[in-house]
């Protein structure tokens, strides 16, 4: 056995695994409906961290009987804190200057991340990791670093105790694996279909199994005790396991959804096991998997994977807030954003992470004194320090003057309108279901009082096409079931004022696939009208199977599907093209081309350029009504 080496073997293939993981995560954030399982890159990081840290600690504990906690914590802090603090300070300074609406809760962001408890802050605040449309924080992704930070703090102590109590590898492995299993079981038991899964996604208790699987591997598969040479058959078996594991990981990147029941009922645990097998084969010096995942590109990206992970969200959030028509050239913007992320992470790695990781902090006083000398040897480098101090000052300013309420007035107005509409529509739905044929249209005109005041000054001399008296009478008596997302919720009262017998079910953040269960439920209760209006696609696209299930639930009823106007999201063209193509497959489907009708009319929308404002709702309601009423 190769146990005599004093210096730890650097396993270059682990950089390849890091590259695979960070590519998955970034592509998931950029194109979540093409790489729907890219979020699984995080469990790969977890398993790898568990293995590497335990491998290091295990060797020290076996030699000295305990881990040097001070040395371990100091190394971790020097490795992780420089990049994390720089990212938080730079991002906070930017939003203080340019995007103050993102300052809400900035104090909890700063302290939550510095203390590595930000994942629980997100749980308490009810943040959703899977909301693709609402404005997201540039710090959302940092939850995983908090879980790792908690692991780094507690694990040296726990591992030492396990060795003292159990003494042998097998019972230690069994204990750790059993705890990992119960963590995965907790995830499965807490998951409820139809509810937001962010509590389970962010929770340390429900995610620790990935890290623990890595730690259990290190107990029975320590890197220094693995044979450097293997018989041909053994090597082929290891390589086969590695290749199959790698193939399964890539396949699951494309196939496993973060909002699927299977993901939380063992899917993520299975993926972590597969990642553990891949890491085991790469760690073995007698196998070929390490060579397979070693190349200059993977090595370069793997070494910068921490910075790439750190800076991905700020770059995406800030870039996309300034580029309004991403949907026009989605893949071009993907390339630009990835390039920016890589450049910034390289600068961070080269000038911040590496220098501070190897800096001798015992020389801090000496360096500070030299810095302030008139003829300092640091010269122009002092400008960097001045810049850093300015960024820190801006961050402190943002934290001190953190807004207590939402500063985006347009967004607040939209939120109020939707809440008021949903309340009014819910009351009207009860009347419809109770067979009460009351005319509820008279109340609708007062429901739009708080729409964007900016829209009033933006009105043009043109007005939307008005409905004829005959059309109004026909619409008032027409029974329609409408299912949709926040755009329908925004326009629900306007539509109800025209179609007074319309049953509306609209929810913020609704995905197209969510409509399947709703439609099936209404059909089973015989409450699905012969005319169905759909407003879905704002929050993401749908695949052929989901479309088939939606149309199957509706049956032979007439379907009107309003296409999307979401120029700030990459899936706009995908959704609209899919709907156009679907009309050839489903003869009872008619697409209402709201995109074409509303395009280039920015004054019809709130600041998000997606939801019609008070002025735009006149066009929205009348256009949809005419499309339905004039359809032959």
Image (cartoon, rainbow, N blue to C red):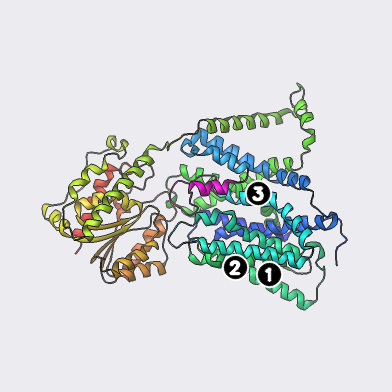
C-alpha span from label 2 to label 1: 15 Å
Give neighbour class at mark 3: few <14, some 14-19, many 20+ (Cα, 10 Å). Answer: many
Tag shown at residue 272:
none
Q: Quadrant of the C terminus?
A: bottom left
Element type at marker 3? helix
Element type at marker 1? helix
User: Which residue is label 3 attached to?
Assistant: 149
User: Which residue is label 2 attached to?
Assistant: 270
Tag count in the figure?
3
The residues colored magenta run 117-140
User: Which residue is label 1 attached to?
Assistant: 242
Element type at marker 2? helix
Give neighbour class at mark 2: few <14, some 14-19, many 20+ (Cα, 10 Å). Answer: some
Magenta stretch contains residue 137: yes
**Does residue 156 lie above or below 226 as drawn?**
above
C-alpha span from label 2 to label 3: 24 Å
Residue 409 placed where, x, y %? Answer: 38, 37
> Magenta part mainly helix, strand or loop?
loop
């Amino acid at each position: 056995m190769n146990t005599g080496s004093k210096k730890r073997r650097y396993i270059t293939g682990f950089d390849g695994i890091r590259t695979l993981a960070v590519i998955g995560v970034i592509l998931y954030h950029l194109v979540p409906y093409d790489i729907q399982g890219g979020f699984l890159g995080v469990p790969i990081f977890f398993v790898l961290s568990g293995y590497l840290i335990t491998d290091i600690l295990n060797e020290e504990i076996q030699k000295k009987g305990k881990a040097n906690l001070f040395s371990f914590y100091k190394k971790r802090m020097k490795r992780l804190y420089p990049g994390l603090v720089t990212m938080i300070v730079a991002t906070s300074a930017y939003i203080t200057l340019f995007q103050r609406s993102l300052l809400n809760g900035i104090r909890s962001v700063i302290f939550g991340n510095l203390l590595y408890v930000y994942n629980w802050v997100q749980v308490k605040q009810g943040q959703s990791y899977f909301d693709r449309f609402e404005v997201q924080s540039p710090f959302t992704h940092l939850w995983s670093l908090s879980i790792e930070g908690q692991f780094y703090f507690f694990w040296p102590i726990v591992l030492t105790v396990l060795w003292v109590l159990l003494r042998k590898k097998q019972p230690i492995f069994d204990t750790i694996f059993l705890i990992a299993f119960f963590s995965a079981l907790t995830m499965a038991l807490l998951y409820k279909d139809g509810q937001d899964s962010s509590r389970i996604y962010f929770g340390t208790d429900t995610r620790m199994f990935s890290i623990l699987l890595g730690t259990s591997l290190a107990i029975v598969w320590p890197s220094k005790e693995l044979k450097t040479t293997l018989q041909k058959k053994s090597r082929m078996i290891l390589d086969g396991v590695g290749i199959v594991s790698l193939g399964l990981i890539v396949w699951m990147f494309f196939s496993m959804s973060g909002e699927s029941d299977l993901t939380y009922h063992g899917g993520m645990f299975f993926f972590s096991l597969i990642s553990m097998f891949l890491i085991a084969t790469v760690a073995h010096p007698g196998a070929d998997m390490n060579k397979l995942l070693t190349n200059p590109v993977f090595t370069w990206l793997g070494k910068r994977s921490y910075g790439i992970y750190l800076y991905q969200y700020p770059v995406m959030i800030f870039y996309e807030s300034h580029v309004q028509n991403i949907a026009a050239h989605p893949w071009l913007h993907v390339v630009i954003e990835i390039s920016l992320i890589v450049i910034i992470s390289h600068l961070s790695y080269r000038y911040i992470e590496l220098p501070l990781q190897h800096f001798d902090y015992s020389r801090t006083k000496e360096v500070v004194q030299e810095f302030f000398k008139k003829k300092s040897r640091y010269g122009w480098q002092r400008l960097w320090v001045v810049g850093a101090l300015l960024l820190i000052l801006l961050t402190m300013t943002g934290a001190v003057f953190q807004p207590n309420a939402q500063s985006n007035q347009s967004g607040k107005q939209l939120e109020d309108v939707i809440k008021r509409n949903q309340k009014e529509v819910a009351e009207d739905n009860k009347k419809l279901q109770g067979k009460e044929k009351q005319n509820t249209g008279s109340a609708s005109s007062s429901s739009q009082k708080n729409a964007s005041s900016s829209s009033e000054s933006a009105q043009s001399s043109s007005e939307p096409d008005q409905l004829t008296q005959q059309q109004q009478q026909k619409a008032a008596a027409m029974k329609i079931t409408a299912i949709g997302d926040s755009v329908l919720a925004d326009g629900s009262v306007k539509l109800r004022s025209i179609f007074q017998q319309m049953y509306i079910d609209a929810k913020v953040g609704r995905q197209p696939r969510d409509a399947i269960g709703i439609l099936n439920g209404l059909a089973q209760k015989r409450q699905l009208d012969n005319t169905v209006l759909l407003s879905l696609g704002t929050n993401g696209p749908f695949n052929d199977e989901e479309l088939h299930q939606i149309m199957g639930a509706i049956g032979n009823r007439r379907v009107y599907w309003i296409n999307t106007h979401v120029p700030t999201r990459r899936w706009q063209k995908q959704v609209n093209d899919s709907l156009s193509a679907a009309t050839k497959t489903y003869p009872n489907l008619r697409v209402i081309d709201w995109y074409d009708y509303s395009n280039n009319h920015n004054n019809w929308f709130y600041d998000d350029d997606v939801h019609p404002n008070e002025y735009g709702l006149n066009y929205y309601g009348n256009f949809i009504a005419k499309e339905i009423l004039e359809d032959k």
